[in-house]
Image (cartoon, helix red, strand yellow):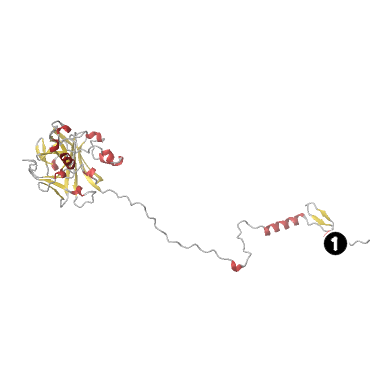
């Protein structure tokens, strides 16, 4: 039986040192040549990871990336209204230092009722009773003795002043209004002349509802009431000055009533609860206006209670 020569598909193979099986009669390439071939193949076939993928379909179906639509910038809207800054004004102060010398200073602070009340009791030209006789408020100096109803002559420790502007942008209209008290409004010589009081002025009086009290201090039946509350349209009227007016206030060692043109009016005292109406920073700024004061306790207690006319009317009605 004759056998045909084996076909190429069935050629005997042998293993080379590199693990590649070759047919008998086929010489293996040198090692350097094989390495070069493999390196070239790897270089050609290896693709970088960031290579852009190619489309294998119809090129006509390829689409260019569309640009994002342009959007108009929108200005952010604030949910809350911007905080309104307080109006500032200039305050002038005269006081006594530790050596008893007069020191003058100027300050810039908010034009709020709490600050202005310390500077706006008496208009220029108001007559006060001193141990040397009557003296206009603008001529009064720290260290001078002023007559009080409770303590007799007391030295003035502090004088503050400011200017009321009729068209100033203040918080309330009352800050630019004055009260004119006609002569003899409360009796003969009370006051002796017309008195123009500022927004921070208070009068000492004994209301009808408290006339049965005969003690001293808070039990005397006397109270301090804002001068504006006595407005009746005839002998006591509210006015808006047509031009700037300089107003003053003064502070004693203790709170007391001082004699002003025959009537009793209040020396300055911030009143109880000031620390609750101001924040710590604002309170520190307020106290800086009083060189002789370190804390609110240094003002001492009120000589008499403070009562508004509305409260007195309710007591009378009851």
Left or right: 98, with 185 as reference point: right
Q: Nearer the viewer, residue 207 or 236?
A: 207
State the residue position of label 1.
Answer: 7
Q: Residue at x 30, y 41 (%)?
A: 281
Quadrant in which the C terminus appears? top left
Residue sitting at x 22%, y 48% = 172
In the image as oriented, which residue stretches furthest toward the top?
215
Q: Is residue 189 left or right of residue 69?
A: left
| Residue lying at 25% horizontally and 34% vertically, measured from the top left | 297
- Decide: few, some or many residues near mark 1? Use Cα within 10 Å; few <14, some 14-19, many ≥20: few
Occupied quadrant, residue 97: top left
Q: Farthest left residue? A: 188
Residue 297 in the image: above or below residue 88: above
Q: Nearer the viewer, residue 166 or 91?
A: 166
Q: Quadrant of residue 210?
A: top left
Residue 178 picture location, percent across and down = 16, 47
- Residue lying furthest front: 318
């Amino acid at each position: 039986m004759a056998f045909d020569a084996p076909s190429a598909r069935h050629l005997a193979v042998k293993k080379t040192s590199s693990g590649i099986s070759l047919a008998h009669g086929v010489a293996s390439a040198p090692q350097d040549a094989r390495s070069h071939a493999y390196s070239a193949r790897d270089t050609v076939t290896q693709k970088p990871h960031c290579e852009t993928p190619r489309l294998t379909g119809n090129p006509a179906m390829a689409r260019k990336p569309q640009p994002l639509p342009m959007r108009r910038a929108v200005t952010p809207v604030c949910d809350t209204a911007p905080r309104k800054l307080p109006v500032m004004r200039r305050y002038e102060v005269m006081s006594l230092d530790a050596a008893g010398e007069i020191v003058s200073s100027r300050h810039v602070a908010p034009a709020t009722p709490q600050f202005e009340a310390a500077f706006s009791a008496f208009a220029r030209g108001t007559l006060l009773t001193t141990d040397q006789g009557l003296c206009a408020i603008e001529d009064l100096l720290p260290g001078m003795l002023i007559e009080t109803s409770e303590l007799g002559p007391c030295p003035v420790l502090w004088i503050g002043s400011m200017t009321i502007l009729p068209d100033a942008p203040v918080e309330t209209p009352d800050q630019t209004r004055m009260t004119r008290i006609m002569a003899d409004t409360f009796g003969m010589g009370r006051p002796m002349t017309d008195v123009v009081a500022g927004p921070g002025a208070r009068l000492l009086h004994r209301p009808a509802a408290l006339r049965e009290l005969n003690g001293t201090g808070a039990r005397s039946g006397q109270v301090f009431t804002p001068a504006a509350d006595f407005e009746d349209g005839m002998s006591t009227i509210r006015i808006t000055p047509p031009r700037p007016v300089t107003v003053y206030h003064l502070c004693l060692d203790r709170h007391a009533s001082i004699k002003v043109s025959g009537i009793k009016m209040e020396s300055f005292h911030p009143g109880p609860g000031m620390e609750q109406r101001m924040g710590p920073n604002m309170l520190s700024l307020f106290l800086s206006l009083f060189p002789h004061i370190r804390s609110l306790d240094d003002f001492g207690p009120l000589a008499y209670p403070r009562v508004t006319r509305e409260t007195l009317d309710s007591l009378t009605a009851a």
